[in-house]
Amino acid sequence: MRPRARVSADMPREVFNALSAVRVRQEKVAGIYADGCGLYLVVSASGARWWQWRGMVHGRRVELGMGSAREVSLTEARRMAVEWRKLARAGGDPRAERDKARRKSITFEEAARRVWADQVADEGGNAKHRQQWIATLEKYAFPKIGPRAIHAVDQSDMLRILAPIWTETPETARRVRQRLRVVLDWARAAGLRDGVNPVEGVEKGLPKQKDKQQHFAALPWAELPALMKRLAVAPGMGAAALRLTILTAARSGETRGATWDEIDPERATWTIPAARMKAKVEHRVPLSRPALAVLDSLDGPRVGLVFPSARRDRPLSDMTLSAVLKRLNVPVTVHGFRSTFRDWAEEAGEWPHEVKESALAHTIKDKVEAAYRRGDLFEKRKLLMDAWGAYCG
């Protein structure tokens, strides 16, 4: 029999020790989980988890970050929650006490190196990318704000880092911006800073990039595996169509109009006729194992439309796929997942430019290159899409 938890006099009797160390480590469903004494575990869709304390301070309800669940144990979080609750009841301010300690917090460089060591250095994928992750910060960020306390970093610091490279090397600048965002998001989750990430909205203070095209809201690629798990259990034909769209980096209309005679499961290939392609050129799509699994999961005869609407002779509407995202409260567009795929291919591997462009069925703008490229790079794209399918989970 499980032993009863010891009740502290400082804990409300109706809720105490609701969490366990195992659940703190393994909880995968995004949400906010109460433990007692105002202590909550927050789990994000990307799998990040941190502690939060909620209570009344000077007659007002406040929410204070207590640190990452990877850095602060359940026992320590409970001790802090009890102390903060007692302090608030006595008329004190837990925020002020926390900020006293925060003034001695780690520097931006220390925070960035910790994030790199914990989240990047040991992850799978390309070794060169992992080294470039920290190298870009060493080159562009550390000389300007490396010694600065992480809680004191603000948007003016972001401008100092990004302004010199924003128009000169746009792609590098965007990668640096993304890595700055990751470090500062971690610092907030770790309880080392409050407020909005200073990277958000920094573009308003920078000149327009000539090569930047971002018309569709896209999901950060690090958050995609968690979304795919949610889609896997979501009911309906729309969720299945969205999964295949993501796994193949296809356009929504290409998926919704797919017919079973375009699918060759033996060769793991989906051949989209020229009439249904934006560039009016036939496009062969390599089907990864997860993509084939989506097709295998579908009920009904293997004739006609793969994803029919309630009226079997008509395809799903574009709004059907968008409605799936709306129900899951994911504020991105269906087309934006093509950007998610492109960002992943840039960050997580060394795939040749032409292979990535061919996977997205982009038209070759350079006439000389188009004249010399005779094939469709299918075998190389197959390796890319297999890696993408494995990453999506």
Image: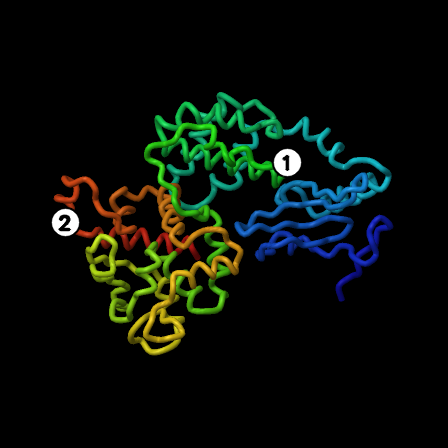
Q: List the single residue furthest toward the bottom.
A: 301
- Residue 66, image x, y percentages: 68, 41
Distance of label 1 from label 2 (alpha carbons): 54 Å
Whichever of callouts 1 and 2 sits on the residue coming sooner in the sequence is 1
- Residue 324, image x, y percentages: 47, 61
Amino acid type at image mark 2: Arg
Judged left or right of residue 60, residue 277 is left
Q: Quadrant of the N terminus?
A: bottom right
Q: Residues within 10 Å of mark 2 (few under 14, many from 20)?
A: few
Q: Secondary structure at mark 2?
A: loop
- Residue 304, image x, y percentages: 29, 74
Q: Relative to 293, does residue 139 appear above or below in the rendering?
A: above
Disc nearest the viewer among 1 and 2: 1
Judged left or right of residue 142, residue 307 is left
Q: Residue at x 63, y 42 (%)?
A: 68
Rendered image quadrant of residue 281: bottom left
Labels 1 & 2 near each other (Cβ < 8 A): no
Viewer-nearest residue: 96 or 2: 96
- Residue 20, image x, y percentages: 69, 55
Rendered image quadrant of residue 206: top left
Q: Quadrant of the C terminus?
A: bottom left
Q: Residue at x 78, y 44 (%)?
A: 56
Q: Relative to 187, does residue 384 appear above or below in the rendering?
A: below
Q: Which residue in the structure is indicated by mark 1?
A: 194
Q: Which residue in the structure is indicated by mark 2?
A: 374
Amino acid type at image mark 1: Asp
Q: Relative to 323, does residue 175 appear above or below in the rendering?
A: above
Q: Residue at x 42, y 38 (%)?
A: 130
Judged left or right of residue 194, residue 11 is right
